[in-house]
Structures are given as structure tokens and as C-alpha cells.
């Protein structure tokens, strides 16, 4: 919480020194705290800083700190309990970002054409339970599982992939997957992707991933889970990707409409 308050103090100083700002101090403090709750920085049930801590951090009066907290409570963003302090009651839910699918798929194919792929394994397997649920499979139905490592054009590995794909009857060979973008092979099987959902997070490298990427076990990785849907709205392809963040970054450019 101390680091968080120091970051807020820096933002507070920038706003406070704005000669055009005529917003009352309590409202500035209230908005600073409110934005941290709404964007998920302060998560549900976390304890808020005390009024005294706000007074010390932002060098405001006790009345200013109390009024800012009262405003948050009136909007039901926090709950105040005598003897227990104030806690966040707002439940933050990240909103998915929507972007054109065509451009995204083209970028994935482009990346596949300008990197080196090593196929570790191609298997027909009964997938893990959570994968089977997403693919709407029964307990004994099988799926194509492919494990790959992607390297840059200098031969330095930067990504480790595990994918589970339905409906592929041809083309998933070691030679094809190492020389042709996987999405092209999926299209050649008559599968048309209409929607892709991605979840970005962080993960620590397992031993086998670390060995493939030339890292140490436990090193931080960028993680992307990508679910692809067909024309009927069913998930037909799941890919679990982890990247070395020193060699790969994920950027999105979006225009306001």
C-alpha cells in the first residue's frame, strides 16, 4: 500500500500544481481514489488507507480526507466499518477489448512467415478436462495437440506453444507445421475463423519451457491464451502461448471510432 500511495502522491502533485485547476481538494482526492478502484488497482475487499494516512501522504486536512472517503462510501465503492477501517466493495471486471479480426490474423500469419518453428510433438490425445470443456468434447473424444517452439530469424528461441485443434484431418505434419503458418493449414481444412478471444497474463517458466527457451526455471514470461471460434460460434482451436518478454512484446494499436 505504501508504494501505491507514493504513486498516487506523484499524480496528486501533478494535478495540484496545475494553475488551471479549481477543483476542491477533497474532490481531487476522491477522484484519485475512485479511479484506482474503478480500474482494478484497488481490488474488492482490500483495505483502504486510513484517513490519517491520507492526511500524512497528501498533506491535506482531516476534513478533506474524511469528505473524500465519505464520497466513495456514498457511491458504494467502499464500506466503512467502525474499528475495522474501510474496504473496497466494488467488484472490478476487466472489459474485453474489441479489435478487427482480419488484421489480427494477418499479423499472426506474418509472424509465422518471419520466424523459425521447431515442432516438438504432434499427438492425437484426450485433452485435459478444462480444454475438453472449452471444446465441448466428451470425456473420451480426442483432439490434435501440437507443441512448438518459435525462434527469431537469428535462431534465438522466444516462444513456446501448445495448441489443441478440432476438425483438422490433413496437413498437421512436422514438415508442414515447420514451413507453413499453422493458420493457413487450418484454413486449408475448410475451417473459417470468425472470432478470437485472447487473455494476457504473466506466468513463471516451468522446467521444460525454460530449457526450450534458454531460461531459468521460474523466470517471468508473457502468457497469452487464445481461443478461436468457427462460423457456428464454437471454439475449435485453443493455443497456450508463453513468450520471453526480453525478446517479444505485444502491442495493439486502436483508433477511436
Image: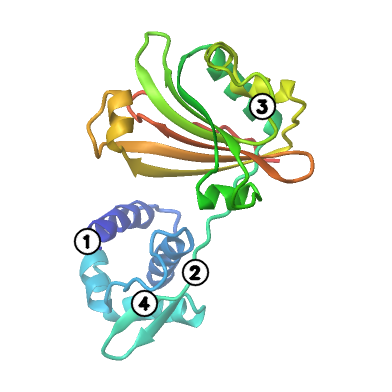
Q: Which residue is mark 2?
A: 91
Residue 231: x percent and y percent? 78, 39
Residue, x 25% and y 28% (percent of image)?
Answer: 215
113 relative to 148 in the view: left or right: right
Q: Which residue is mark 1?
A: 2
Nearest the eye: 7 or 55: 7
Q: Which residue is mark 4?
A: 87
Residue topped by disc 3: 103
Q: Which residue is located at x 51 percent, y 12 percent? A: 114
Question: Label 2: how many residues lie within 10 Å, few (<14), some (14-19) or many (20+)?
Answer: some
Report helix, strand or loop for mark 2.
loop
Left or right of 125 on screen, residue 29 = left
- The residue at the far top in this view is 154
Mark 1 residue element: helix
Assess disc 4: are there few (<14), some (14-19) or many (≥20) residues with their C-alpha within 10 Å of its C-alpha: many
Q: Is residue 161 above or below residue 54?
A: above
The mark lying in front, picked from 1 and 4, is 4
Earlier in the chain: of badge 3 and badge 2, it is 2
First reached walking from the N terminus: tag 4 or tag 3: 4
Element under label 4? strand
Amino acid at each position: 500500500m505504501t508504494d501505491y500511495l507514493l504513486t498516487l502522491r506523484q499524480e496528486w502533485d501533478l494535478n495540484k500544481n496545475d494553475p488551471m485547476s479549481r477543483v476542491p481538494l477533497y474532490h481531487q482526492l476522491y477522484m484519485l481514489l475512485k479511479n484506482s478502484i474503478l480500474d482494478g488497482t484497488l481490488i474488492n475487499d482490500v483495505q483502504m488507507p486510513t484517513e490519517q494516512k491520507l492526511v500524512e501522504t497528501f498533506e491535506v486536512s482531516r476534513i478533506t480526507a474524511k469528505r473524500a472517503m465519505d464520497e466513495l462510501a456514498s457511491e458504494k465503492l467502499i464500506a466503512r466499518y467502525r474499528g475495522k477501517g474501510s474496504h473496497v466493495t466494488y467488484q472490478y471486471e476487466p472489459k474485453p477489448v474489441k479489435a478487427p479480426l482480419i488484421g489480427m490474423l494477418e499479423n499472426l500469419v506474418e509472424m509465422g512467415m518471419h520466424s523459425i518453428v521447431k515442432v516438438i510433438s504432434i499427438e492425437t490425445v484426450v485433452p485435459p478436462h478444462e480444454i475438453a470443456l472449452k471444446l465441448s468434447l466428451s470425456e473420451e473424444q480426442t483432439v490434435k495437440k501440437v507443441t512448438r517452439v518459435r525462434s527469431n530469424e537469428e535462431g534465438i528461441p522466444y516462444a513456446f506453444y501448445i495448441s489443441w485443434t478440432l476438425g483438422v484431418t490433413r496437413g498437421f505434419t512436422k514438415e508442414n507445421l515447420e514451413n507453413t503458418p499453422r493458420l493457413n493449414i487450418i484454413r486449408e481444412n475448410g475451417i473459417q475463423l470468425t472470432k478470437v478471444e485472447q487473455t494476457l497474463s504473466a506466468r513463471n517458466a516451468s522446467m521444460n519451457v525454460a530449457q526450450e527457451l534458454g531460461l531459468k526455471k521460474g523466470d517471468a514470461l508473457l502468457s497469452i491464451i487464445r481461443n478461436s471460434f468457427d462460423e457456428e460460434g464454437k471454439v475449435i482451436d485453443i493455443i497456450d502461448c508463453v513468450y520471453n518478454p526480453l525478446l517479444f512484446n505485444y502491442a495493439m494499436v486502436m483508433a477511436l471510432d
